[in-house]
Image: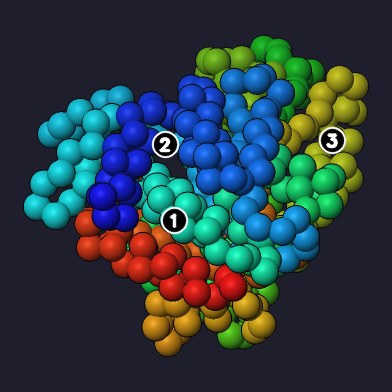
């Protein structure tokens, strides 16, 4: 069986696991753990608090600092209300493409990495090769954040990471972060004819939105001079302002759903500090003058770190050598790469398939792209001894 045929078989098995983020990924994780253990890898499975999800971290080669992480996520987005031409959880081949939920995002890369594990295991490795497969990337990178904390606690310090998100095998060295929040406002209900006797949560929420708009404008001036993103500054978007029950009732509850996409970590800290000061020094004192239990609370939905382009990046240089590329780019979509960068690793994103296919019905990865991915991993083997 050729490696490409083996990858197809592995990918078919992975697609058959319906690892939608709302459901367990344990069966897929155990399947991968068994495959890697058969190669002699030291395999660890780290569960979340519910016990229904788990991260996989496996190592071939010497147990020492340094080495390479091949990283992917196990979860996929739902197929509900999507019109598929074939069963989304059965690999279907047509016109040089492999169809199925997760084919490109991102079980294709995971299948390719696992297929290469026996060859990597046969090498006299001078540095470790790690395989990381996480849960809940699609809903906020919760698995990768838990994985990072575990690696910190255990003192495991890889040097570089290749995150195999679909990039058409182009080398990506940067992307913005994605921070999502819901800010809740608790006021005091009352009759609309006596507004001074209540605390109008919607009005305070509106003032908060106005502050977000002010910060949004200020962030333009903080754009790095050599910024490569489009747009080159950190953005803020107010997605929803919800509150109120009737024309003549002072609303006691409201919420604002918003996000920011930082181009640099300092921008996120700037925004959060400004909002904290605005709430504690302006909004909350005014609300509590009328009702001592009134207040503002921000719920963190997810904080996914961006991948900041850096001048020295061994991962970028390695993958450029493996693929023959002569440059690297940045993208608008987010990945787990920034979390690995936060651990001190040098990181690049490069994987088979197009992000344009991700999350859509009839998701696919082309056989040609998978071949290019395998070729990259084959050449990686020559760098490991």
Towards the viewer: 219 or 32: 32
Check disc 2: other Cα within 10 Å, few if <14, some if 14-19, many if 20+.
many
| Residue annotated with mark 3 | 284
SS for callout 1: helix
The residue mark sitting in front, 3 or 1, is 1
Question: Which of the two discs, 3 and 2, labels the residue nearer the N terminus?
Answer: 2
Towards the viewer: 45 or 237: 45
The residue mark sitting in front, 1 or 2, is 1
Q: Quadrant of the rendered structure where residue 307 is?
A: bottom right
Residue at 49% x, 39% y is 35
SS for callout 3: helix
Gap between marks 3 and 2 measured at Cα: 40 Å
Residue at 65% x, 84% y is 311
Q: Position of residue 353 (x, y in %)?
A: 31, 57
SS for callout 2: loop
Check disc 1: other Cα within 10 Å, few if <14, some if 14-19, many if 20+.
some
Q: Which mark is residue 76?
A: 2
> Can residue 163 be seen here?
no
Towards the viewer: 295 or 148: 148
Is 222 on the left-hand or right-hand side of 77? right
């Amino acid at each position: 069986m050729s490696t490409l045929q083996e990858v197809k078989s592995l990918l078919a098995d992975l697609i058959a696991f319906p690892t939608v983020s709302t459901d367990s990924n344990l069966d897929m994780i155990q399947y991968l753990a068994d495959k890697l253990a058969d190669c002699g890898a030291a395999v660890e499975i780290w569960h979340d608090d519910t016990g229904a999800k788990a991260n996989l971290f496996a190592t071939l080669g010497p147990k020492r600092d340094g080495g390479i992480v091949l990283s992917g996520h196990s979860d996929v987005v739902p197929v509900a209300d999507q019109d598929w031409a074939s069963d989304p959880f059965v690999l279907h081949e047509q016109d040089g493409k492999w169809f199925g939920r997760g084919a490109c995002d991102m079980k294709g890369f995971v299948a390719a990495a696992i297929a290469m594990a026996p060859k990597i295991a046969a090498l006299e490795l001078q540095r470790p090769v790690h395989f990381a497969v996480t849960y809940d990337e699609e809903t906020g990178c919760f698995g990768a954040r838990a994985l990072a904390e575990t690696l910190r606690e255990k003192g495991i310090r890889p040097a570089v990471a290749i995150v195999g998100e679909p990039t058409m095998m182009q080398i990506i060295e940067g992307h913005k972060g994605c921070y999502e929040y819901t800010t809740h406002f608790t006021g005091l209900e009352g009759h609309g004819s006596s507004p001074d006797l209540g605390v109008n949560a919607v009005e305070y929420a509106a003032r908060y939105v106005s502050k977000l708009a002010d910060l949004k404008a200020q962030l333009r001036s903080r754009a790095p001079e050599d910024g490569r993103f489009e747009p080159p500054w950190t953005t803020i978007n107010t997605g929803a302002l919800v509150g109120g029950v009737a024309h003549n009732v002072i609303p006691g509850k409201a919420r604002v759903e918003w996000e920011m996409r930082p181009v640099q970590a300092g921008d996120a800290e700037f925004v959060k500090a400004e909002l904290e000061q605005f709430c504690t020094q302006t909004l909350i004192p005014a609300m509590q003058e009328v009702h001592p239990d009134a207040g503002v609370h921000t719920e963190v939905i997810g904080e996914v770190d961006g991948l900041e382009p850096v001048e020295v990046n061994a991962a970028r240089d390695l993958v450029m050598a493996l693929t023959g590329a002569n440059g690297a780019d940045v993208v608008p979509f987010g990945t787990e790469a920034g979390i690995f960068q936060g651990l001190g690793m040098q990181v690049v994103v490069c994987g088979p398939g197009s992000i344009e296919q991700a999350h859509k019905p009839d998701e696919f990865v082309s056989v040609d792209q998978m071949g290019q991915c395998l070729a990259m991993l084959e050449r990686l083997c020559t760098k490991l001894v």
